[in-house]
Image (spheres, rainbow, N blue to C red):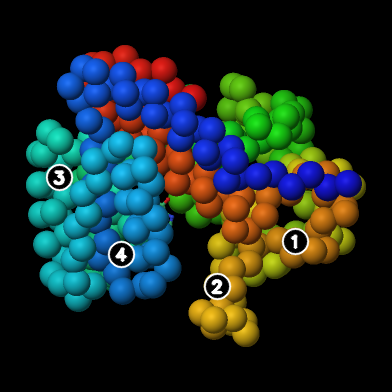
Amino acid sequence: MTEIIDGDAVAAEIRDELREGIEALADAGERPGLATVLMSDDPASETYVSMKQRDCEEVGIEGVHVELDADAPAEELYDTVEELNDDPDVHGILVQMPVPDHVDDRRVLRSIDPEKDVDGFHPENVGRMVAGDARFKPCTPHGVQKLLEAADVETEGAEAVVVGRSDIVGKPMANLLVQKAPLGNATTTVCHSRTEDLAAHTRRADVVIAAAGVPEMIDGSMLTEGATVIDVGVNRVEADTEKGYELVGDVDFESATGTAGAITPVPGGVGPMTRAMLLYNTVKAASRQSGVAVDLP
Ligand code: GUN
């Protein structure tokens, strides 16, 4: 029997606990604020950002959304970030990635006030996380840790294989898994597009984190019996549906089910957790900036 790890349910629990923190802030006259900035015509990015705004509204976070034309001058985005840095009602800033090619994405990430960097992508925050003193853990890897915890998966001493080496997921995920800390202490391998024999690595893994962005690249034959499989992939593939596409993960769910001991579905696995951890970081940011102590889940 393969356990299906229900990300929607775990995310709902986290949101419930965050509401208590938001109330504690409200009692002190503070309302957490999150600014999202979108400079893209990509329909998937538009959907992600609108879901993040909807989440804010649902839990009582003040959402501010700034939308820039994808062909606007890069300076408009740099100026927007500066304005949001200076706005005391905005505790968290998220610039949806990727930004257009004519924008220097590194400059954008460096220009966000590290205290408002709820993505955890600013080099100062990356450095702090690597040093084991995270201010804001990046939302997706943090959400994966929360899923592993909820599913009672022991990472200590486990063989963990992360497939994918992005700055947003793969690298920080591997980093958290090797840390000498709860939900870390795993013997961690990072595989990527130049890995010679991916299956040889994944077959050894007690925990597989698939974050390569390649539809259904990992199937049941690449897993060991009982492995925990966390599928970070969200890929739109053409399908005979109303929208003309369907969402699939990086794992071939059907073939992995049966071999895996536990697996996350797509959708309904990691996606809702990423969004919940963004709310978590926003509440944390508001607590740090206001000096009002808050219990976090
Ligand atoms: N694009 C894809 N995932 C993310 C994320 O977690 N944060 C931001 N800012 N952009 C993204």
**256 is higher (above) or lower (below) than 275:** below
Q: Considering only order in the chain, which callout, 2 or 1, is on the residue closer to the N terminus?
A: 2
Q: Secondary structure at mark 4?
A: loop
- The answer for how far apart the CA atoms under marks 4 and 3 are is 17 Å
Q: Is residue 167 visible?
A: yes
* Residue nearest the viewer, comparing 220 with 243: 243
Residue type marked 1: Phe
Location of residue 115 by image quarter: top left
Side of 10 where 112 appears, left or right: left
Residue type marked 3: Leu
Q: Nearer the viewer, mark 3 or mark 1?
A: 1
Residue type marked 4: Val
Residue on which disc 1 sits: 253
Q: Is residue 219 visible?
A: no
Q: Secondary structure at mark 1?
A: helix
Q: Position of residue 238 (x, y in %)?
A: 59, 82
**Mark drawn on residue 168:** none
Q: Position of residue 157 (x, y in %)?
A: 76, 28
Residue on which disc 2 sits: 236
**Mark drawn on residue 99:** 4
Location of residue 27 by image quarter: top left
CB within 8 Å, label 2 to label 3:
no
Side of 11 where 111 appears, left or right: left
Mark 2 vs ligand 1: CB below 8 Å: no
Residue on which disc 3 sits: 84
Q: Nearer the viewer, mark 4 or mark 2?
A: 2
Q: Secondary structure at mark 3?
A: helix
- The answer for how far apart the CA atoms under marks 1 and 4 are is 31 Å
Q: Secondary structure at mark 2?
A: strand
**230 is higher (above) or lower (below) than 19:** below
